[in-house]
Amino acid sequence: MQNASAPATLSSAPASPAPGNVSSVRPRIVVVGAGFGGLTAARGLASAELDVVVIDRHNYHLFQPLLYQVATAALSPAEIASPVRAILSRHANATVLLAKVVEVDKEAREVLLEGGRRISYDTLILATGARHAYFGHDNWEGVAPGLKKIEDATTLRRRILLAFEKAEAECDPAERRALLTFAVIGAGPTGVELAGALVELARRALAGDFRNIDTRSSRILLVEAGPRVLPSMPKSLSSKAQAALERLGVEVRLASPVTECDRHGIVVGTERIPVRTIVWAAGVAASPAARWLGADHDRAGRVKVQADLTLPGHPEIFVIGDTALALQADGTPVPGVAPAAKQQGHHVARTIRARLSGAAPPGPFRYRNLGTLATIGRKSAVADFGFVRLSGLLAWLLWGAVHIFFLIGFRNRIVVLLEWLWAYFTFKRGARLITGGEM
Amino acid sequence: MQNASAPATLSSAPASPAPGNVSSVRPRIVVVGAGFGGLTAARGLASAELDVVVIDRHNYHLFQPLLYQVATAALSPAEIASPVRAILSRHANATVLLAKVVEVDKEAREVLLEGGRRISYDTLILATGARHAYFGHDNWEGVAPGLKKIEDATTLRRRILLAFEKAEAECDPAERRALLTFAVIGAGPTGVELAGALVELARRALAGDFRNIDTRSSRILLVEAGPRVLPSMPKSLSSKAQAALERLGVEVRLASPVTECDRHGIVVGTERIPVRTIVWAAGVAASPAARWLGADHDRAGRVKVQADLTLPGHPEIFVIGDTALALQADGTPVPGVAPAAKQQGHHVARTIRARLSGAAPPGPFRYRNLGTLATIGRKSAVADFGFVRLSGLLAWLLWGAVHIFFLIGFRNRIVVLLEWLWAYFTFKRGARLITGGEM
């Protein structure tokens, strides 16, 4: 893959009907990104008379909603990631390519890969997701990493566990205090879930393992610029979530934009708080798909798409998931959540199949909000289904059930369920490893 | 930990009875290394009237015998690693320190840590293990990594899985062939187990997931300089193991010293074999403990110890496990295996407790060979218990039972057992992740 002299065709392997740059008989659909949107689209095209090529930089599909549990040592990476090849193994019309896309040539209808290879397409589906955004403070990334990739999660796990180790060895009380202070910036679902998990790690899982520090005295701050936690949820649930977080011991700071972020800590308003571990959960920016396409995009980099999720003027290019800015009937954007990406993947697959068979297209995409959920900690979560709002134990059980159900792969479902049961009954964490680098 | 201005005492935390450099009332035992030997020694001193300080570079105890299963995507790192703090959490006299030892000051009786801190000891136990040795070919390490640490295993997993990915995208048949060739150098237990696991990965777990290559055509070479595989086992079991490997599809090359090793492949005798993935399982060298001590050592760097496992002239310094060269009654060295390290840890703990109570020391250390086991693949292993030798299914079941039994932690036992059952029935691998770096 890193071979710069790699040939320009997708493949010329002898045995199988490999797609080449010469137009094959069957139309070729190239899907970039094997997240919720891309994978759903590829699976939705399984039985169609076309070739599907799925390109991703990673060899696995990552279940991002549980990534914070890897960062807080509750789950192992492999428990929330499944190899894309294995997922699509029985889809005879699907080819998986581990590669990094660097450009799209709309005129030639080709995707350019790192190393110079070109993959031609008849239809392109861009589902490349998002990264975190620092709103002009890109230099904060080093001290306040975000949480989108497996490597982000293991890096964060490393930093969190090392903070306790350093505190144990530290003699200066002020420095020890700073090492035992953790700041999560941004109180959306990821921030809320991370803060809750951090409290449990400090108060329960690590308690008793150290000799010179009391991990239960750790301070976990959840800092939010807006007026409430979980801003996408109804106000009543925001209050309930905040109360539950505070009961757990999280210090919730609302209407508190962070104005400075460095290795000494954060500045909130005029107050400087010494913190050694900062997590960024405040903002996302779309992947560079808009740049590849030279397309119209919003401030967050999301590509503006039409009602059928195609790029204006390019019915052969679909953009879905966190990469796309799709407007709903009321003018608000489709939210950047997994169910929305999946629904868009389905919709695109239906559209392509309709085109293939000459049937009428399925009409404009409409996002169906099936409900939103956020867990706060042990036996505590909030859920909003429009017609009913839940909080507490019931919402927590529902949260668990939904996440197990949507995990890909029977094995992962079983293993995650067992890890959760074990953690519930023992209060311990199964993946407390500091890996990658010598301390 | 990385703070160069850290104070010179172990700790001056206010609340707990932290050990300082001033001699405390209770004698302090410093254990360097939380492997099989060090951990057994620390646990063996649990109820004694002394302070135990366990120092390790990692925050976890690693069950090295199963590391090859992480490298071949069968297990996740956290499934064979347990946090040292959690293991020793209930041992009130034990303190755990995450730190890197850089020197030992025998005169001052102090261990020097990276960053300048000094930890004084009354008794020192060095159990720092071994790394792989390249017998004067240190430049081979880059192309032929060994397997001792978690990072080694995830790096190797990455290389192995990437080789298949690159082969899938490769058009040149010769290069594809080289990418699908894997060489394991050294046919001791690790090499044999790795070769067997690689065959299963290629023939079973990955079969059907690729479109342009047939992973079942992969070539797995096991190259050994000596005359037989598993040289530490009886000849009859070596033959059985070799036959089993060959039935699986491993190409066993005996009496074949590797004379060259580079990114194009290996040279065996006069034959150059194009290989893109090489694993080093041929030799180990002790950790730098001999250098720290300025002690007499053998070619492999093992510290020559007396019958009671102490350094000559230093009854307060014990060296155990792979770091030590302890001779048996017949003049042969105690083998570098986990049971030997554990027995030595027990013996040292007994000696220290005897000294404390003024009782007679337990006499010279004697290694009791409880049997050796090596697995080859599905339903196939060899076992030697002296009085009885087993091979095939029974040895395989025994191998599995023994390894589950000796894993530390109930959770790990359950999870590994489930992973194995799942792999047995589905032929799949649970941890097929290419992580760390962008391809």
Image: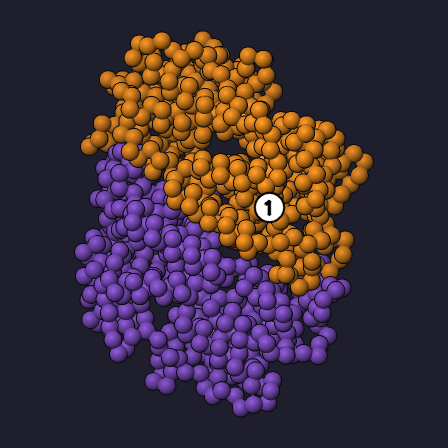
Chain colours: A orange, B purple
Q: Position of residue A313 (x, y in %)?
A: 45, 8
Compare residues A376 and B263 and report the one nearer the observer: A376
Compare residues B262 and B321 and report the one nearer the observer: B321
Compare residues B153 and A428 and report the one nearer the observer: A428
Q: Quadrant of residue B354?
A: bottom right
Name the quarter where the N terminus of chain A is drawn.
Answer: top left
What residue is shown at x 26% (from left), y 51% (from top)? Answer: B199
Q: Quadrant of residue A126?
A: top left
Give the letter of the chain under mark 1: A
The local crowd at label 1, few if under 14, some if 14 to 19, many if 20 or more residues have their Cα within 10 Å, is some
Q: Is residue A212 above or below residue A31?
A: below
Kindly state the secondary structure of the residue where label 1 is placed. Answer: loop
Name the residue tied to disc 1.
A378
- Position of residue A97 in the picture relative to residue B22 (left or right): left
What residue is shown at x 35% (from left), y 32% (from top)? Answer: A97
What residue is shown at x 56% (from left), y 27% (from top)? Answer: A385
Name the quarter where the C terminus of chain A is drawn.
Answer: bottom right
